[in-house]
Amino acid sequence: MQNIQQFKSEFFKALAHPMRIRILEVLSEGDKNVNELQNILGSEGSAVSQQLAVLRNKNVVYGRKEGTSVIYSLRDPLIKDLLAVAKQIFDNHLVDAITLLEDIRKD
C-alpha cells in the first residue's frame, strides 16, 4: 500500500507547477517539440526545457528523437482525463464560491 502512496505523492509533485500543468494540457492535444511548446506557452526555451526535464524524470512525459528535434508525448493518455477532472473540481469550487457570495449579498 505504501508503494502506491509514494507513487501518487511523486506523481502529484511532478504536476505541482503551473507551467508543467500547461505543458500537459498542450500535450493532451497532441505531440509537440520544444519549439512548438515555447510558441504555444509564450515562454523561453530554457524554462520549457527545465519543466519538461522534471516531467520526463517523473515519467509523466517522454521524448523521442525525430531528426534534430525531440517530440514530446504524454506517457499515459489518462493524464488528459486527470486534467479534465481537476478542471471539474475547480469549477465545482468556483460554483460553491459564487453561491456563497450570492447568499452573502442577499443578507
Image (tube, grey):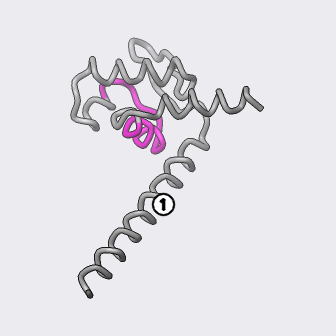
Residue furthest toward the top? 68
Front in this rendered view, residue 69 or 13: 13
Is 73 positioned to the left or the right of 34 in the image? right
For the point 37% across and 65% down, which residue is it?
94
Residue furthest toward the front? 107
The secondary element bearing badge 1 is classed as helix
For the point 56% across and 31% down, which residue is it?
11
Is 22 positioned to the left or the right of 75 in the image? left
- Name the quadrant of the N terminus: top right
Residue 34 coordinates in the image, percent (x, y) = 35, 24
Residue furthest toward the right? 1
Which residue was labeled with disc 1?
88
For the point 57% across and 50% down, which residue is it?
81
Q: Quadrant of residue 51?
A: top left
Q: Is residue 56 above or below residue 4?
A: above
Residue 92 coordinates in the image, percent (x, y) = 45, 65
Q: Is residue 95 above or below residue 55?
A: below
Residue 106 coordinates in the image, percent (x, y) = 26, 87
Is 70 positioned to the left or the right of 19 in the image? right
Is 20 positioned to the left or the right of 40 in the image? right
Three-letter code, disc 1: Gln
Q: Give the range drawn in magenta.
A: 21-35
Label 1 crowd (10 A; few <14 / some 14-19 / many >=20): few
Residue 49 coordinates in the image, percent (x, y) = 35, 19
- Name the quadrant of the C terminus: bottom left
For the point 45% across and 20% down, which residue is it?
54
